[in-house]
Image (cartoon, grey):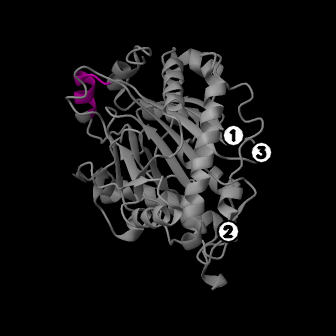
Amino acid sequence: MAQSRKRPHAAVAEDVELERSLLKSGLGGAACGVDSGGVPVIDMSQGDDACAAAMWEAATGVGFFTVTNHGIDEALIDRAFGAAASFFAQPVADKETQSPFAREMNSGFEYMAQVRPSTGLADRKESLQITARAGAMEGRWPASPGDFEGTAKELMAKAHALGCRVLSLLEPRACPTLSRGTLAKSHQLWAPDGQCTLRLLHYMPTDKAALAALQASGRQHWRAGPHTDWCCCTLLFQRPGNEGLECASNPRAGSTRWTAVDPVPGGIAVNVGDMLARWSDNRLLSNLHRVRLPTPAECDPPKPRYSMAFFLQADKHCMLESETYEPITAGDYLLGRIRSNFADSAAAVANQADGAAAGAAEGAAPAEGAA
């Protein structure tokens, strides 16, 4: 069996190539065929057995599910969204000064710097990445708003606990050879080699003229291009009125149908990532997802879209082992994926040039719609 395994870095390249193939095949740009309702909602106040069964069915099907009664206080989520909106309302230069982006640390603020292999274009968004590793946020915590760091750390602690519960419920069937609790223990907060990350996302308002310019550019633009997540699992916080997320099963599962993942009041969307797919020997597959451009109705008047994603990324030293792949540390795996999306600042600037008129309309007033 060992001789048929895929080499560590070749396997990372394969995952990147899967995303790149979405552009060549047209799958990444296929129309969304299923409106909201195709993604299961799981009440976590049920017993563990019922939750685990429902999560497994969803994770091996559409790939996304939404959890309710999850134990994270809505007031905390609201505070975190408020802190994010206040930060993003500042001028881009101020945000870059407060939280300079460090690619190798997966931390800091970026403005339209992420270029997906599936599109070759910069995502039409800005984000702040907070990696829970000792020293990763040194010199990168925003000074404004004043309660930002405390609110972010409080949300991360709650999201980490929920994410570890999800992983523990999936673990017996996903990774039957692992000792129980291995997945949860492999994701530490603020450890010397921790990699869990909270990403605050702001998709800038787009007016009708900017939307028309993007659509007439001859290339297919996205607020976030089609991709899989690199982690074990993702918790996504989104609010009603901020629609746009769409998902499809991993192409390795043979499905090509895109489904809307609309916000559910009081709910958190969950999806499987590439690390868990690898660790589970593909018993679970990471799923595709993307954020579409706003509709004309959503541009009248223009409004922003905010979301917050918590990525459970295994600690750097953790060895991702399976029968299919040669072992690779979680640190090496994550770094390979980061480099495929954030090549360098010059490349990011070059990719921003496509649709520059629309980008100017989106980014001209950083404070617009950020209340």
Q: Residues within 10 Å of mark 3 (few under 14, many from 20)?
A: some
Disc 1: which residue: 132
Disc 3: which residue: 191
354 lies above or below 278: above
Q: Position of residue 315 (x, y in %)?
A: 71, 53
Q: Are marks 3 and 1 in contact (CB under 8 Å)?
A: no
Mark 3 or mark 1: name the one nearer the start of the chain: 1
Residue 56 at least partly seen: yes
- Residue type for callout 3: Ala
Please report the residue visible at 55 percent of the width from the left and 56 percent of the height from the top: 166
- Residue type for callout 1: Ala
Q: Position of residue 19 (x, y in %)?
A: 44, 56
Disc 2: which residue: 180
Q: Residues within 10 Å of mark 2 (few under 14, many from 20)?
A: some
- The answer for how far apart the CA atoms under marks 3 and 1 are is 7 Å
Please report the residue visible at 47 percent of the width from the left and 33 percent of the height from the top: 350
- The answer for how far apart the CA atoms under marks 3 and 2 are is 21 Å
